[in-house]
Structures are given as structure tokens and as C-alpha cells.
């Protein structure tokens, strides 16, 4: 029994010595691995946060896409009707008879006369507007001293 106890104490002492030596040699490696694990945990947390933000943005984009799709579905019939009206207008314009050069010259002279008259009217209206503005300022000046 005493030999057993001695043997077990010796074996335990050798085991502790081996464990101590292994721990001493592996201490730097374990420390480096612990730092790497910590860094990876932080990176994973950052990636999860960014993934959550990306998923939130994706949900927002999906909502916008659904709204855009609904608007597009609503507008397409209107656009088709407008295109049909445009095509009808193009066809009616294509059916107009061609004019000869005398008619074109007369049309151009009429257009030029209309443009000249419009320019004169604009000048007259601008003069009237200046005259009315001047009258307004004179009336304001006339009324301003008596009000004080």
C-alpha cells in the first residue's frame, strides 16, 4: 500500500511537471489564439450589424419597388391610350394634302405677319404695364404723405 501511494504520488508529480512544461511552451500560442478569437468575435459582431443594416435597406428597397410596380401598373393603360391617340394624330397629319410652293409662300408670309403683330402686341402690353406701374407708384406716393 505504501508503494502504491508512493507510485501514485510520483506519477502525479510527473504529470504536473509535464503539464507545466506543456503549458509553459504553449502559453504564447494560446495567448495569440485567444487574441485571434476575440478579433474574430468582434468582426463577426460587426458583420452581423452590417448584415442587419443591409437587410433593412433591402426591405426598404422592396417596398419602394412594390410601390413603383403598382404605379407602373396604374400608368401603363394611360400611356397606351396616349400612344393610340398619338398614332391617330400622326395618321391624320399624314392625310393632309401637300401644298404647292405658292401656297407655302403665302402660308409663310401669313405666319410672319402674325408673328410681327404678336411682337407689336407684346410691346404695347409691356408699355401698358409700365404705365400702370408708374400710376400705381404715383398714387402710392400721393397717398403715403397724407396717411402719416
Image: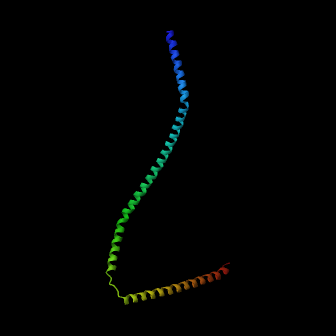
Q: Which quadrant of the structure image shows residue 85?
A: bottom left
Depth order, front residue of 35/81: 35
What is the total number of numbered labels drawn onto the structure image? 0
Q: Position of residue 137 (x, y in %)?
A: 62, 81
How was the colour assigned to the protein in this rendering?
A: rainbow
Residue 93 appears left or right of 52: left
Most extreme residue toward the top, as rendered?
A: 1
**Relative to 72, does residue 90 appear above or below in the rendering?**
below
Q: Quadrant of residue 111?
A: bottom left
Name the foreground residue: 8 vs 141.
8
**In this picture, residue 104 sits left or right of residue 122:** left
Which of the two residues, 37 or 61, is positioned nearer the viewer here? 37
**Vertical order, 108 against 43 (above or below):** below
In the image, is residue 116 above or below residue 72? below
Estimate the x, y position of residue 81 in percent, counting from the top left.
34, 70
Q: Position of residue 72 (x, y in %)?
A: 38, 62
Is 19 on the left or on the right of 104, as rendered?
right
Of the pair 62 and 95, the residue shown nearer to us? 95
The residue drawn where x is 34% and y is 76% is 90
Please name the residue shown 54% across and 28% down the image. Answer: 25
In the rendered image, the quadrant that contains the C terminus is bottom right
Spot occupied by residue 144 in the image (x, y as percentages of width and height): 65, 79
Q: Residue at x 43, y 57 (%)?
A: 64
Amino acid at each position: 500500500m505504501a508503494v502504491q501511494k508512493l507510485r501514485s504520488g510520483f506519477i502525479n508529480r510527473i504529470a504536473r511537471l509535464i503539464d507545466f512544461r506543456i503549458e509553459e511552451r504553449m502559453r504564447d500560442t494560446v495567448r495569440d489564439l485567444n487574441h485571434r478569437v476575440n478579433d474574430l468575435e468582434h468582426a463577426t459582431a460587426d458583420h452581423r450589424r452590417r448584415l442587419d443594416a443591409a437587410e433593412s435597406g433591402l426591405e426598404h428597397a422592396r417596398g419602394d419597388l412594390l410601390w413603383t410596380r403598382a404605379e407602373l401598373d396604374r400608368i401603363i393603360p394611360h400611356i397606351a391610350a396616349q400612344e393610340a391617340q398619338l398614332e391617330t394624330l400622326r395618321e391624320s397629319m399624314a392625310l393632309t394634302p401637300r401644298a404647292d410652293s405658292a401656297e407655302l409662300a403665302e402660308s409663310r408670309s401669313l405666319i410672319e405677319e402674325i408673328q410681327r403683330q404678336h411682337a407689336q402686341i407684346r410691346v404695347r402690353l409691356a408699355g401698358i404695364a409700365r404705365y400702370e406701374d408708374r400710376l400705381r407708384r404715383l398714387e402710392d406716393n400721393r397717398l403715403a404723405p397724407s396717411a402719416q
